Image (tube, coloured by chain):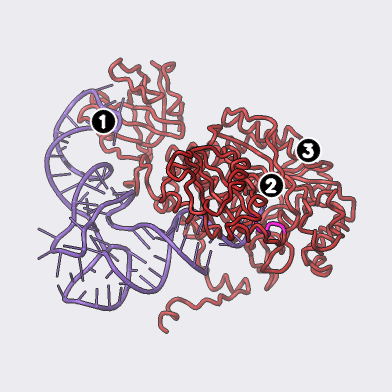
Amino acid sequence: MNRTHYCNDVREELVGGRVNLCGWVNRRRDHGGVIFVDLRDRTGLVQVVFSPEQQQQNHEAARSLRNEYVIMVSGVVVRRTEETRNPKLPTGLIEVQVDLLRILNAAAPLPFQLDDEDVGEGVRFAYRFLDLRRVDMQRNLLVRHRALQSLRRTLDDSGFLEIETPMLTRSTPEGARDYLVPSRVHPGQFYALPQSPQLFKQLLMIGGFDRYFQITRCFRDEDLRADRQPEFTQVDLEMSFVESDDVMQLVEKLVSRLFAEVMGVELVHPFGRLTYAEAMDRYGLDAPDVRIRMELVDVTAIMRDTGFKVFAQVAKQAGRPGRQGAIKVLRVPGGAALTRKEIDDYTAFVAIYGAKGLAYIKINAPWQEGGWQSPIVKFFSDEEKEALIQATGAVVGDLLFFGADQLKVVNEALGRLRVKIGRDLNLIDDKPFSFVWVTEFPLLDWDEEAKRFAAVHHPFTAPMIEDFIRLDGEAGVVDLVRSQAYDLVLNGSEVGGGSIRIHDPAMQRRMLELLNIGPAEAEEKFGFLLKALEFGAPPHGGLALGLDRLIAIMLGVDSIRDVIAFPKTQKAGCLLTQAPSAVDALQLRELHLRTTLRPREESVKE
RNA sequence: GGGGGUGUAGUUCAGUUGGUUAGAAUGCUGGCCUGUCACGCCGGAGGUCGCGGGUUCGAGCCCCGUCGCUCCCGCCA
């Protein structure tokens, strides 16, 4: 078609020269005589001009142009006069005097304006092909592309081989619900779409590939959130003959180059590290936003004999790790200025996470009315008050929020509250990207409903060597075993997670046993892995980055839907293609399937 | 599975205590306009008030149900 330049490339250097441009009509300004058209392609805009002095044919055609018509123009680049320059446009110093216009395609009026920032996602997704023309989406997907190239480059440079693994695989227990694919050839049997390439990448290590990576789609049939899609992209990598530190260092290099190359940002090195225990203790969450200048303080010991019965009772509760009673304080600098309504709102907020209340103390100056202002302070002795001040470092003008419940509830409630208040009161360091590693996650977690242990990471995660001995100890301490698992956290969001894997078959069998998966079931469902481990499995470990979330944070967008070309709605539907959909009876028959749903008409008739 | 929000013109929204002909902006469209760049000026068209039922003399508004979208809890690493 003979295009010579992209729109945004038409600059002063080309003045006097001829250019052929292709693109969309972003806007037409018809003055009756001269007609201006902003021509757009993915690089930007350039103004092209149709003068009546030009061939009348062109001018007539230019009058018929509408938004989003697809055109090709040929013309001469001219410098604009002083008064007609547009400093808002990168190409604003020049324009193109068109002498040839070809209308390549017409366009119907758009369902929404491309420059309208407030269009609902419903319309955007139904017309995603138009939505993708908007500058934001063009930028987002460009950044995503550059990120992918950067990651591939670094991994290639670091000796990683990109290897694909099956999308049609077998269903495994543990973890999320699988998306199932019925087999036509094997009546009544199903493939599952992978939740991750976990087992295959371990097999690749056993297969001797030493360093593997893959940028791949993963599928989980669970309910969605702003940062969750039914299919999402992982940067998956695995390395042989490594320990946690090796993986973390590699990932730091990977991420640092990514941010340098794509964002022009030099990250602080090395990334901060917290153990899971520290993270929970200081921040209440396993993915802390360490930019927020507040920490939780455990005051359980101080409150053990307090006159405030609610606290005293909680402080004396025992239970499984995380389930014992605890009292923690979140000190809010300047929080004494919070209004009653704001405090009520925060109380309602923590209730979401199971907190039954949110006691508080406003630390007013002694000469102010009442000094400390609080519904509960009357129960505290002077010693307890003094101890609280010591423990929290509270000063006049602060507010203390108390969480008193099972430790698990307190951590979650105050942890989330910390983040919320941090944002509300802008107590966040302005550092845009703050990475931190969280290490030494617990290996197992007690599942109260199923009355068994569940793997915190996944069943192939290696325990810490020094805790391994406890695995054969009494059941009561199994909770305390830590794993060689690590998460990469960015600004309070988990953007990656991984672990050193179990490479010893005996240990793997023991692990499955702890998860209440008997030898027969283990053999049936993980037999291929257990067998592979028998044949010289190297020590190995790896990590997976959640690419969608990472890109979203890099771009500062709230929803990962904005960094995915064709995302799905919260009910996992596609508004563009109307997937999922009913299928022909014949298709079902071939798959040996019958739905238990009655057709709508029937149920209406009843 | 549960809780919250939302649905009115192509789009973004307003719509009073339930009251007669449902508005605004923008877009679209016809005309005018030779230097605009959010061009301007004059005119016009455009509505299943998500859907179904109910209350009422009367429903965009109240009630019940249902569907879509969205945020959160559970779930999910």
Q: Amino acid at mark 3?
A: Asp
Taking the spot 32% from the left edge, 40% from the top edge, the residue there is A67
List x then y, in percent, for residue A10: 43, 23
- The chain drawn purple is chain what? B
Disc 1 and disc 3: Cα gap in Å? 66 Å
Drawn side of residue A306 relative to residue A439, left or right: left
Any mark on residue A497, and which? Answer: 2
For label 3, the crowd category at 10 Å Cα-Cα, with few meaning under 14, some 14 to 19 and many 20 or more, is some
Discs 1 and 3 share one subunit: yes
- The chain drawn red is chain what? A
Q: Amino acid at mark 2?
A: Gly
Drawn side of residue A260 relative to residue A71, left or right: right
Residue A76 can be seen, yes or no = no
For label 2, the crowd category at 10 Å Cα-Cα, with few meaning under 14, some 14 to 19 and many 20 or more, is many
Q: Which residue is mark 3?
A: A246
Taking the spot 61% from the left edge, 32% from the top edge, the residue there is A259
Any mark on residue A360, and which? Answer: none
Q: Is residue A41 above or below residue A483?
A: above
Q: Amino acid at mark 1?
A: His
List x then y, in percent, for residue A133: 43, 41
Drawn side of residue A166 relative to residue B51, left or right: right
Q: Which residue is mark 1?
A: A59
